[in-house]
Amino acid sequence: MQAPAPRLAQDIWGQSAALVGVLQYHKGAGRAPLLQAAAALRSSKKIVIVGIGASLNGAIPLENLLCSRGFDAVTIEAGELLHYRLGAYRNATFVLVSRSGESVEILKALDALRGQVATIGVTNEPDSRLARQADMAIHLHSPADEMVAIQTHTATILSLYMLGAVATDQWDQAQRDIGAMVETLPAWIAGNLESARQWDQFLEKDSTVYALGRGPSHGSALQSALLFSEVAKAPAIGMAVASFRHGPVEVVDDRFRGLIFAPQGKTRELNLALARELLRFGGSVRVIGPPLEQGTDLPWIGTPPCPEMLAPLVEIVPVQVAALRLAQLRQIVPGSFRFTPQVARDETRIAAAPEAT
């Protein structure tokens, strides 16, 4: 009898059905909160999007979508906002993103903001304190993950994309784009899981992976680094492409492993140019994005075609599988946590110290 797939693999596979459910929810029962939050964004002079970990990474595409339509929006990590930057945004509308709705920095920021500015809570837990105490609340309506944010990460991207689409009067086109994309997901995700061993020649148990992207895909780069750290307990670095070119490129040699996100968009050729340079310097790369019409000599992982602002929803899937595969190669239980709880409720203590063995 074949052993059951790891729970992490089940969460990866479950994304196709989960995202269909998220879409239908926001077109139905979740539509009113989406409209209310979008109206608040449209009337705001400044929008501050706040998250931490996967929630922050999943919010970066919304920042890019809003800025591309002329909104004054910024994404700030919750701990940095809480301790250093609250005083600068007293007239903003805040979008607070947390899958649990109970993360310590998010709740402390919410306490500092309540009654002072408009707050929108985005969470997968409708009974959480964030959902109950924010001025407006958007429920992700995603199945829960075991530990690592997989289904809830892509649900965050999709929910925020729909929020941004309504706020920027792009809802009709967004529905068409999302509908076309979700139809491709079952086969796309299954194919990635079935070909997980394709990563074996790229991954090395002690190699540090650099994930590089621009714009909305900068969130994918940061999420990739988080996935390798959480799933495989392997160091990884996520960076903006331009920043990598200004110095860190000096690390490239024959041990270098790089993931280059290249969605359809105005910086695609710049990203591909970097991939070619890294190969010329002796590194190994994988380009992740919709295939080029004329073909390419670059090592490529093709994704379903979609607008650039929606690309993080699909381009993260092969990285989820790569992190799973690296955990297996390193003989680590995929997605198990050694030190941190799923929800960080304390700013000083990560978790109880493991018992001595």
Image (cartoon, rainbow, N blue to C red):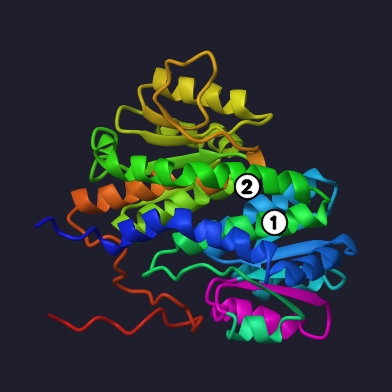
334 or 178, which is in the foreground? 178
Q: CA distance from mark 1 to mark 2?
A: 9 Å
> Does the stretch in magenta take in 118?
yes
Q: Measured from the top left, where is residue 76 in percent x and y?
A: 67, 62
| Residue 23 disc label | none
Residue appearing at x 58%, y 38% in the figure: 243
255 or 17, which is in the foreground? 17
Mark 1 or mark 2, whichever is nearer to me = 2
Quadrant of the drawing holding the C terminus: bottom left
Q: Is residue 16 visible?
A: yes
- State which region is magenta: 98-125
Label 1: which secondary element: helix
Q: Which residue is mark 1?
A: 162
User: Image check: 101 left or right of 67?
Assistant: left
Label 2: which secondary element: helix
| Residue 178 disc label | 2
222 or 178, which is in the foreground? 178
Q: Residues within 10 Å of mark 2 (few under 14, many from 20)?
A: some
Residue appearing at x 69%, y 29% in the figure: 266
Q: Is residue 315 visible?
A: no
Q: Amino acid at mark 1?
A: Met
Residue appearing at x 78%, y 43% in the figure: 68
Q: Taking 185 as reference, is 347 above or below it? A: below
